[in-house]
Image (cartoon, rainbow, N blue to C red):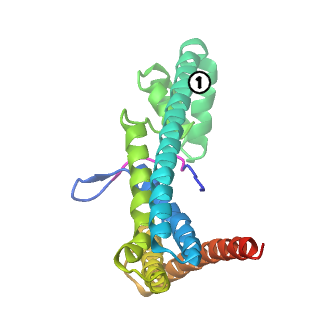
Amino acid sequence: MSLAFVQPRPVAESNSGFKIDSRVISDAIIGLSDGLTVPFALTAGLSALGQTKVVVYGGLAELIAGAISMGLGGYLGAKSEEASYKATEQETRQQVATSPATVAENLYSIFDSYDIPSSTTQELVAHLSESPKCVDFLMRFEHTLSSPTGTRAITCALTIAGGYFFGGFIPLIPYMLIDKVDRALYWSIGSMVIALFVFGYVKTCFVIGWSGRKNIYQGCRGGLEMVVVGSVAAGAAMGLVMAFDHGSGGE
């Protein structure tokens, strides 16, 4: 199972005042993207054995184990992120207290990229050097780090694990409702193709926008890319299981 961690970004606020933490959205994308490919590949591969119970039991076992693993990975990653932030904050606080010349130099380098008049820059540097918010300013603009919330690790773990389980549960539904494994496989593939396309479309349009011909085209392209990735993973898994089954049957 792949697991990637996204650099924390600031909280976005909509016009209605509702705050959306982009890190939670990133966690959901991580969980769903893995959940829509890895369990799909496993269930498609297990269907080659010809027994729906094997697919359901194997799929559920992988879902539970995978969700726990992904959740723990997200939790540990968020705790490492929090520890790294605190270490950087402590180092910055120490630098502000013991090396004002270095702090002033760092502040000047930050403002230089904004093409601010030198007189204004000098006033800003002089003010920030004496301000109790100097550490917060340096953390935000020099180190580009936002302060993690106290519940970040738990939220990350639950979001990734929940997304993985939700995405991976979709291919199991046909096997729970249909006795014939071949027929269930076709329904599973169909439902997963639709789910992969919808996920890819929503994921793409959430970033670039929903309206406009260009955004719709990019959304469809993102959906097709997700379908291709999921299909390749499922085909590889199913081919391996069939090869192993054929090899063992030939002995």
**Left or right side of 84 for 56:** left
- Which residue is label 1 attached to? 103
Q: Main secondary structure of the magenta part?
A: loop
- Write the residue at 51% across / 57% down: 62
Is 109 or 135 nearer to us in this picture? 135
**Would you place residue 93 above or below residue 157 in this image?**
above
* Nearer to us in this view, 79 or 171: 171
Q: Position of residue 9 (x, y in %)?
A: 47, 48
89 or 205, which lies in front?
205
Image-based side of 197 in relation to 158, left or right: right
Q: Please identify the residue farthest to the top as the structure is shown.
A: 98
Q: Which residue is depicted at the point 56% across and 31% down?
A: 84
Image position of 110 with respect to 159: above or below: above
The residue located at (54%, 13%) in the rendering is 97
- Give the x, y percent position of residue 76: 52, 37
The image position of residue 186, as x and y in percent, is 48, 86
Is residue 187 in the magenta section?
no
Q: Which residue is drawn at 49% across and 34% down?
A: 79
Magenta residue span:
6-12
Residue 234 lies in quadrant:
bottom right
- Indicate whether 160 appears above or below 154: below
> Which image quarter is the C terminus in?
bottom right
Query: Which kind of residue does numbered mark 1 sit on?
Result: Val
